[in-house]
Amino acid sequence: MTAGIHEPVPGTAQVARPEEVPGADQPGQPVIDVRNLWKVFGAKASEVPRSPELAGMSRKELKSSTGCVAAVCDLSFEVAPGEVFVVMGLSGSGKSTLVRCLTRLIEPTAGEIWFQGEDVVHASEKSLRELRRHKVSMVFQHFGLLPHRRVIDNVAYGLEIRGTGKAERMKRAGEVIDLVGLSGYEQSFPDQLSGGMQQRVGLARALAGDPQALLFDEPFSALDPLIRRDMQNEVIRLHHEVRKTMVFITHDLSEALKLGDRILIMRDGAIVQIGTPAQVVGAPADDYVRDFVSEVPRSHVLTLRWVMRPPTPEDPTDGPVFPSTAVIRTALHAAAATEKPIRIIDNGALLGVVDRASILETIAGPGEA
């Protein structure tokens, strides 16, 4: 393992910062900055974050002692510009509560939320309306389409609420309908569309206002597996085209690994681990995460950077060449065809080499098919 690379040494619980992630467009101020965020439900909710004793209790102990339920417990994280930040957890982990706190659809109990340097927690009603109408759009699991309105009117609805003129909003709606692959369905009603097509309408509606960030709350959970896969690919395509910052909520590990530049794993309202897909699979923070990723084929997720070593003078100067971002499985045939190590080269610079033994060891690891 090469020291100083992005992925941690297996067995550690390092956290990937936004500036270390390929999906982050640039370092500097995060789009979303969450600090020590709490959401507690119950009559004594405000007491919990202020009391070290209560804050240190398990969810079950807190419920028994105070009658309160801590849905979000002292969460801190940042989301970089252009990043796809996935929040993953089982039902009841607090992930949907968290995403609703980001725009104060649910009021936080304590902590800070900053959006592009603006204080969301203490924002005025006017500032909050501005945030929801112009800066952040949300895509929900159950579509939320207006059944009596045609597709183009559903897509343009947010612009209509803003007060945008009809000609301008129809033009913009037509552009994003084409962007999400629904050209020809502008005059259809929602009940004439499949579930996947309805969710494309939801995506188009969210994009119509040209927001700086998109929040997805388990948007594909109700879809059939094949349609769900298509919609995941659609999100990836749209992200490449429009480069929006995205926060994506899911309970599905494969979806998280497919979409996320980084993944935050929640359990009982708290953070268990934040990391790139490779970090989560290759260096799970604890047994909970380890069990989550136990069936994941490591060679499908870990990159060659994960298993490379420093080059030595004895290494051949020829042989297969791959970028550090290539996942291990893409190098299997090359490794099998030669005794020479694979050279890892980025931007013309030799970063390291990968021996066949390292690849075989990774394939033989837990969770490999």
Image (spheres, rainbow, N blue to C red):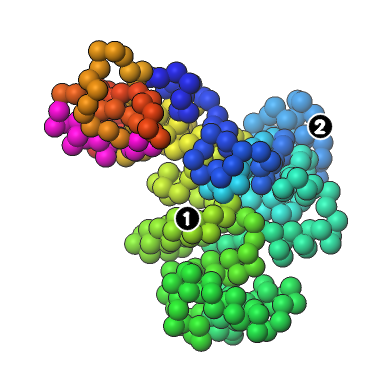
Q: Which disc is residue 240 wearing?
A: 1
Q: Which residue is mark 2?
A: 50
Count of numbered circles on the image: 2
Drawn side of residue 284 relative to residue 208, left or right? left
Name the mark nearer the viewer: 1 or 2. 1
Residue 341 or residue 162, whichever sits in front: 341
Q: Is residue 78 above or below residue 228?
A: above
| Alpha-carbon span between mark 1 and mark 2 | 43 Å
Identify the residue shown where x is 62% and y is 55%.
213
Instruction: Measuring from the top left, give residue 146's x and y in whole percent.
Output: 60, 78
In primary-sequence order, the first of circles 1 and 2 is: 2
Q: Three-letter amino acid code at disc 2?
A: Arg
Q: Residues within 10 Å of mark 1 (few under 14, many from 20)?
A: few
Residue 350 point in image, percent of width and height = 36, 26
State the extent of the magenta-drawn residues as a range.
Answer: 323-338
- Judged left or right of residue 272, residue 344 is left
Is residue 324 visible in this depiction of the protein? no
Q: Amino acid at mark 1?
A: His
Identify which residue, 128 or 317, lies in the foreground: 317
Q: Which element type, helix, strand or loop, lies under badge 1?
A: helix
* Image coordinates for residue 253, horizontal then vertical, percent: 43, 44
Asked whether residue 326 is drawn in magenta, I would say yes
